[in-house]
Image (cartoon, helix red, strand yellow):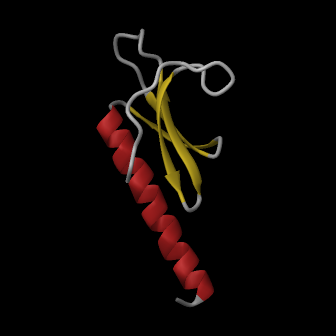
Amino acid sequence: MNWTKPKPPTEGICFYDHVDCETPLGLIRIEWKSWKESPDYGIDLDGKYIGTEYDLETAKYVAKEFLTIKHRELSELLGL
């Protein structure tokens, strides 16, 4: 997966530090409050909540696993 480098809060886009990854199913964004001593990392797909983790690499792994499961489900649905 091709994640962006960490970006600061961007007015009109995201209120928190974040990384993005474009996927065939939509934009996955992981965001966190960098000022916190132990931030949590929220994972969204096109604004829909996927989950929360407690470090960035784990959040990226969870996002990848989410896409893997969706791929499997779509393949079964389409008979591929």
Q: Would residue 58 appear left or right of 63 to someone viewing this image?
A: left
Residue 71 screen position, x and y as percent: 50, 71
Q: Residue at x 41, y 15 (%)?
A: 34
- Eyeballing the image, is 54 above or below 57? above
Residue 44 screen position, x and y as percent: 56, 42
Between 58 and 1, the residue placed more toward the observer is: 1
Between 54 and 78, the residue placed more toward the observer is: 78
Q: Residue at x 42, y 25 (%)?
A: 40
Q: Would residue 71 appear left or right of 15 to someone viewing this image?
A: left
Residue 46 screen position, x and y as percent: 64, 46
- Eyeballing the image, is 37 above or below 16? above
> From the image, which quarter does the N terminus lie in?
bottom left
Q: Residue furthest bottom?
A: 79
Between 16 and 51, the residue placed more toward the observer is: 16
Between 61 and 52, the residue placed more toward the observer is: 61
Residue 80 screen position, x and y as percent: 52, 89
Q: Residue at x 53, y 20 (%)?
A: 16
Q: Residue at x 47, y 57 (%)?
A: 66
- Eyeballing the image, is 44 above or below 5? below
